[in-house]
Amino acid sequence: MTIGVLPDTMLREMIARGEITAEPAITSEQIQPASLDLRLGTVAYRVRASFLAGKGARVESRLAEFEMHRMDLSAGAVLEKGCVYLVPLMESLALPEGLTAVANAKSSTGRLDLLTRLITDEGVEFDRIPQGYQGPLYAEICPRSFSVLVRPGMRLNQIRFRAGQATLSDAELKILHQQEPLVDGVAVIDHGLGFSVDLRPREGDLVGYRAKPHTGVIDLDRIAHYPASEFWEEVRTRDGRIILDPGAFYILVSREAVTIPPDHAAEMAPYLAMVGEFRVHYAGFFDPGFGHGLAGGHGSRGVLEVRCHEAPFALEHGQVVGRLVYERMAQEPAQLYGAGIASNYQGQGLKLAKQFMMS
């Protein structure tokens, strides 16, 4: 098999071979340019703690240790803020040797501060699936800022498959940037492509949003339904600096406009813990064509999901806060990100999740 991230065409081949199965059957809407959306099943387990199955153990057998109660999702159910849930997914895997997988939250999931991670039987890491894995998939869901209403079939996370080592070295990334600019400015390349925070917008002084602590429930199926002002406080500055409050969740935006060429994919990764007491991003997949001219992007800025930890932290304009790790595609996808598919975020700037109405 060609080394690289598997595109939509190869995902369809995996489904045809029975390497990805589901009940009910996988739909075409789930297949993205370089990933597959995963769907919630019909039951959620409220658990007292996050856990991994561990070597030699199945998730189902460990549930007895952690389960508090179970909920039928068929008519919709609320996952409450601050609680941890485990939801069996509709999809299962039978990975061949040489093929690994990695999962990540979808964009809207991350922008809602909805921590969603994949776990598997015998798993010792979140969101990482080794070659040869055969078995079910589960989503661990922890709403951090808002309680949410969910139903079976909702797609909160996605999975990406890769053959071999597809990550570009810094030297290869520099060459790619010379061939086709990956950012609209100086490229900071150090274990990936660094990106910084924009706290000096071209117009006005709105630089981000902070989640309000006491809000109503969000029905994830309702698009452009909730007034943003009921769930978010605007963050404004005229001096290129904001102070992050411990425990608070922010939506900010990168200073750089990013491009993902059609024959590459990328994943957002944290920068260095030493740069500050905060974490950037929950949702991290960037598909081929993101911000690319062929897909109508012409550079799209990365939305940053930021949570501050133990101490207040002064975040400055232009401070490097994360990095994009680029990978080769095994082949170009048949459909690029944002080109003819229902993408809410191509050509984006500062933008909340699709459930909110912007004033």
Image (tube, grey):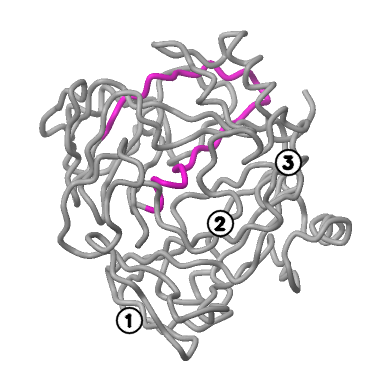
Q: Is residue 125 above or below residue 174?
A: above
Q: In this image, 65 relative to 292: left or right?
A: left
Q: In this image, 18 relative to 9: left or right?
A: left
Q: Residue at x 30, y 74 (%)?
A: 310
- Tell me the kind of residue under disc 3: Ala
Q: Is residue 294 above or below residue 30?
A: below
Instruction: Give the mark, 3 or 2, whose residue is nearer the N terminus.
Output: 3
What separation in Å lies between label 2 and label 1 (alpha carbons)? Answer: 29 Å
Q: Is residue 158 above or below residue 110?
A: above
The residue beneath circle 2 is 348
- Tell me the kind of residue under disc 2: Gln
Image: magenta residue range: 86-111
In the image, farthest residue toward the top: 17
Pick the quarter of the image with the C terminus: bottom left
SS of the residue at dot 1? loop
Q: Which mark is residue 269?
A: none
Q: In this image, 202 relative to 310: left or right?
A: right
What x and y, as percent, mark residue 261?
76, 47
What separation in Å lies between label 1 and label 3 (alpha carbons)? Answer: 38 Å
In the image, farthest residue toward the front: 359
Question: Which secondary structure is most common in the magenta stretch?
Answer: strand
The residue beneath circle 3 is 166
Q: Which mark is residue 312?
A: 1
Verify CB contact (< 8 Å) between mark 3 and mark 2. Answer: no
